[in-house]
Image (spheres, grey):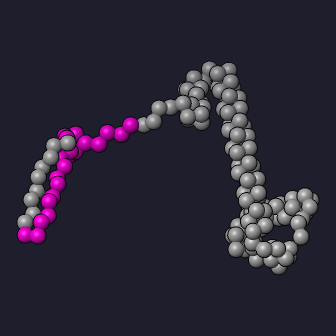
Amino acid sequence: MKSNYATRDARVNECFKMLVEGATRADIQQYAAKNWQITERPVDAYIAAANKLLEKDSKTIRESEIGKAANRLNSLYAKALEIQDYKTCLAIQKEIANLFGYNAPTQTEVSGKGGTDLKIIVEYVNDDTTTTTDTPS
């Protein structure tokens, strides 16, 4: 028997709630078999719909939190500028740049002891002999 839209939405919401509370697919399948008397296939469709809701919520929450953080930082910046606390202004500006990913990625250079070039050692192992070759980097 096909469920109507209200029943479907209620079941998707129940799956959503169960996923938020940590239920696994098997937990939801067992719950659905007992309480809704339906097979795995429609339950998987409900779980998929619930996962889409979770994904939509996470995007909305992320955007909202970034917006709140940006506004808080802008407010702090204005207050620091008002009292001419330029050191704090600079720190806030750096935090805003980090929040929005404006900073270039950090590049790390690896060197040997005392800043010298690294030496790469390659060993060739045969049945009877071992050959070592030094290769400059």
* Quadrant housing residue 8: bottom right
Res. 98 in view: yes
Q: Is residue 131 magenta?
A: no
**Outermost residue to the front:** 1
* Foreground of the two, 136 or 79: 136
- Segment colored magenta: 107-128
Q: Position of residue 36 (x, y in %)?
A: 86, 74
* Quadrant housing residue 7: bottom right
Q: Position of residue 3 (x, y in %)?
A: 89, 65
* Foreground of the two, 122 or 114: 122
Name the residue: 58% across, 28% down. Answer: 93
Q: Is residue 109 magenta?
A: yes
Name the residue: 14% across, 64% down. Answer: 125
Name the residue: 76% across, 58% down. Answer: 50
Q: Is residue 38 left or right of residue 62?
A: right
Q: Is residue 37 left or right of residue 60?
A: right
Q: Quadrant of the C terminus?
A: top left
